[in-house]
Image (spheres, rainbow, N blue to C red):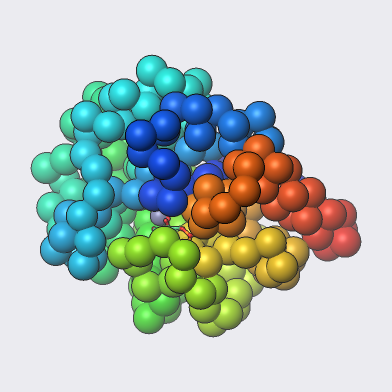
Amino acid sequence: MRDPGLIELAPSILSADFAHLGEQVQQAAEGGATVVHVDIMDGHFVPNLTIGPPVVKSLRKATDLPLDCHLMIENADDFIPAFAEAGANWISVHQEACIHLDRTLHHIRDHGALAGVVINPATPVAMLSEVLDIVDYVLVMSVNPGFGAQKFLPNSLHKMRQLAEIRTRRGLSFRIEVDGGVPLDTVAEIVRAGAEILVAGNAVFGKGDPKTNAEKLLKAATEATLQKV
Ligand code: DX5
Ligand code: ZN
């Protein structure tokens, strides 16, 4: 899965206009977005309620881009088959919500999706030591999950550096995704810390044209990658 140096933008549709979801995603894709981030919230694991498999199914018909479903739900095992069937290509679950995380990650893979594990701001990277060799990507939350347009929490930067260091030391291949409050003026620092997949909701769909917003974010991120070398 991993292509070192590849930076991808994954707009989060949570901040998009749901009445025009297909067009909004298309505009972001024209701006260079290559993944669509889909926030699934159950009103229990997080204090908000969003969407389920039916919306993923509709989105599947509106774009060929990979659908990156971020499950902020308590009983992920029960819903993984339905999301995979609806067209999810990547499925991530929270370490804090999965008692049998190893089984859940294999369950995702058994349904043909890439498996990701997510950690909240208060959860240390050390909690993932036993699953880093079975995941395709690690999602570092840079806000407390549940809402878009929150402020980026800088303590997530050292987690990305830690993950990049562990990956090299253990010869692993997971990718590093960051999610929450990723603004244009900090994206370079985030990429230099090791993030390769950048989730952005408000920065893409908040105001202005999603195409132009996506282009600006990707330009800043790619330039930071060149500086890193
Ligand atoms: C928050 C979600 C994020 C959020 C990102 O719980 O997981 O994906 O939608 O949106 P911004 O970039 O606006 O913080
Ligand atoms: Zn998310």
Q: Position of residue 14 (x, y in %)?
A: 39, 49
The location of residue 60, given as percent across then percent down, is 38, 23
Quadrant including the C terminus: bottom right
- Residue found 21% across the figure and 67% down from its top: 47
Q: Is residue 106 left or right of residue 43?
A: right
Residue 8 in sight in this render: no
Q: Residue furthest top?
A: 61
Q: Quadrant of the N terminus?
A: top right
Identify the residue at horizontal 55%, vertical 28% (top origin): 26
At which x and y percent is residue 101?
A: 25, 57
88 vs 147: above or below: above
Q: In the drawing, does residue 213 fall left or right of residue 94? A: right
- Please name the residue shown 20% across and 55% down the image: 49
Seen in the picture, residue 20 relative to 164 is either above or below; the reply is above
Q: Quadrant of residue 121?
A: bottom left
Q: From what the image shows, is residue 80 above or below residue 228?
A: above
Q: Is residue 153 left or right of residue 193?
A: left
| Residue shown at the point (30%, 60%) measured from the top left | 94
* Vertical arrangement, residue 96 with respect to residue 123, above or below: above
Find ligand 2 in the image and state its quadrant: bottom left
> Residue 62, image x and y in percent?
43, 21
